[in-house]
Image: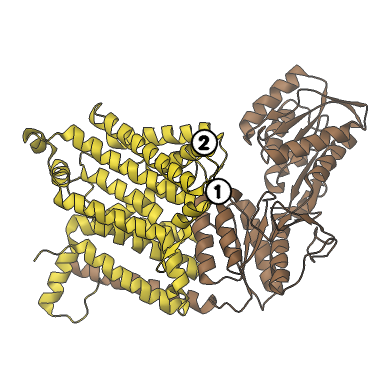
Amino acid sequence: MKNKNNTLNKRVKLALLTAAMGMAGHSAFAADGNTITTVVKISGIPWFDRMETGVELYAKQHPEMNISQVGPATADSAQQLQIIQDLIAKGTDALAVVPMDPTILEALLKRAMARGTIVVTHEADNQINTMVDVEAFDNTDYGTALNERLADCMGGAGKWTTFVGSLGSRTHLQWVGAGEKNAMKYPGMKLVDPNNESFDDANGTYKKAKEILRKHPDIKGFQTSAGNDVLGVGRAIEEAGLAGKVCLVGTGLPNPSAAYLDSGAITAIGFWDPQKAGMAMNEVARILLKGGQIEDGMNLGVEGYEHVSVRPGAGDGKLLVGNGMVLVDKETYKEHLF
Amino acid sequence: MKRDANLWVLCTLIIVLFGFGGVVSGGTYLSLFNLQSMAMQVPEIGLLAIGVMLAMCAGNGGIDLSGIANANLSGVASGIFTLSLFDASQDPMLFTIAFAAGCVVIGLLGGIFNGVIISRFGITPILGTLGTQMLFTGVAVVLSDGRSVTVGSPDPLYVIGNGLVFGIPTSFIIFILIGCLLGVILKYTPYGMRLMLTGANPKAAVYSGFPSGRIIITTYAISGLLAGIAGIIIAARNINVKWDYGSSYLLVAILIAVMAGVRPEGGYGRIITVILSAVVLQLLSSLLNFIGLSNFVRDLAWGVLLLCFLGVGRFDLINRILASLTSMRSPHVTK
């Protein structure tokens, strides 16, 4: 038992040592002004795996930079906080952060900037302590675009309704709000029972959508917001045999939605591509590292960020808004499978 | 001579980690800034771990799962309360004192509540504190509407979270002072002795006429008090407090206690090893971030560590290995 333990100990140590040496070879700890680390909310989920492909692509395009992506294994803002704190201490030159909870990171990001670290954020237009917050699109434009697609499918007439993740979700309300406003262009469109809460739960949404289909047998359209809403409503539409007859446009991801898009239960889905957002964040960080300025109308060289609009952010920083909205249907979703 | 195996292992680990980190990072790991940065991260989790340790020492399956929930509730409730009463910009000192006092009181009340349901109603600690964990979290959600509460950074509070005294983070000094104080209490006061004896053999303690109910309530109250102080430090560091902060701390706090050689069956535990164990975990955690390993490796490492140290405690491995090595007169003493 003793011997076993000793050999085991040695083996483990050897393995660890080799691993660490290998790592040390790859990762430069240098503070020579070219390290950009992207910190995501959680690693290992499809959304941020997709973002990582963008970060890797960007790293390939810029071999002189030291670019990588990390993130906590569990969805805990304290974990993300620790990772960022260690990265600052390590001397990372620029951080591209997708905050789990912007408020928890405020103090730390402030200290990071005070120490000269470049800070870029994403999905956090209320972040005060950031230099540039990158948003894929303007929320009003997005809501309008979703609704325009819906109106197009509905022929500009008929009953329609909306789903939001929850009534506390600011962006979702902005999307459906813009949608309602757009629908006013079409006098034939009649909004019924708006702002159903889905809580991003496909099953709950499915039940609610079935109720709505029963209550309004003549309903023609759904505009949904949270990522799983299209799946729930799509299932309800398909089971009612209404695929292709009732229109459904909402936020969703191509892979999970593929079957419903093919069957016609989902008319179109909208989203932004985290791959492009990851690249855009890194590009902004690189420009700032080189001492450049972020200006209105500039081209980041990333699809959807060729002509960005820049306005004052929540704090002293800037809010950069791209036109990275993607709207795909049965014909086009295959170009964006993730 | 009886050695404290865990103390040895932990000290060795600290030296090894410092050496290893220094080499791998080319010195950055040992820079003053990183040492301060790591020291700043230890206190909140360290205080919670001491709370877990005390609960474990009380025996009878003692554990405190409500630590981080209690800390968050303290910060959230005291924050809302203090913000409504005082203006931080007008009188930052008064604001800080009121906020800190609020945290301590709420944490203490939470702890007493734990102690009462465990000792008076005879509920198993793991279930009782699991219940209060959800209760505290729930109350914090309701009080704050699920949003984060901005405590702000009035000067004295900012110093607690981010200030340095002689280059050492204030929060770390507070943590060490509390550790020393509790260490003395456990070692030299009747309460400390009774706590350990109750944990070692509850039945004998009852027959010896120990007020075991009061001992248990006191123990969980101290654990709650520590959670309240952790709440102050969290708020001071982050400006904002939120109900779901640190959901991963729960298991890490238990890991720290087990690594420190606290006996899960009760009756034994030392503050010094808990502090060292918290430091080891921080060093390792930061090192993994420095190397840039995936954070899934961290979970793996924690699990392996937990099992290893449980094994060390269970089979007294270190003493055996050391003994065999000395008898063989082997020159290299492995950990």
- Left or right of B129 on screen, residue A148: right
Quarter assignment of residue A208? top right
Chain B colour in the picture: yellow
Q: Nearer the viewer, residue B78 or B130?
A: B78
Q: Residue at x 51, y 60 (%)?
A: A83
As measured in the structure, the alpha-carbon distance from the residue carrying label 1 to the one carrying label 2 is 14 Å
Quarter assignment of residue A112? bottom right
Q: How many marks?
A: 2
Q: Which residue is mark 2?
A: B85
Mark 1 and mark 2, same subunit?
A: yes
Q: Which residue is mark 1?
A: B152
SS at mark 2 in the image:
helix
- Left or right of A90 on screen, residue A123: right
SS at mark 1 in the image:
loop
- In the displayed structure, B138 sits above or below B46; it is above
Q: Earlier in the sequence, mark 1 or mark 2?
A: 2
- In the displayed structure, B196 sits above or below B118; it is below
Q: Chain of mark 2?
A: B
Specify few, some or many for label 1: CA neighbours under 10 Å numbering under 14, 14-19, or 20 or more.
many
Residue B93 is situated, as x and y percent measured from the top left of the image, at 47, 49
User: Which residue is at the far bottom?
Assistant: B331
Q: Amino acid at mark 1?
A: Gly
Can you tell which chain is drawn brown?
Answer: A
- Left or right of A41 on screen, residue B327: left
Q: Residue at x 49, y 77 (%)?
A: A24
Q: Is residue A249 visible?
A: no
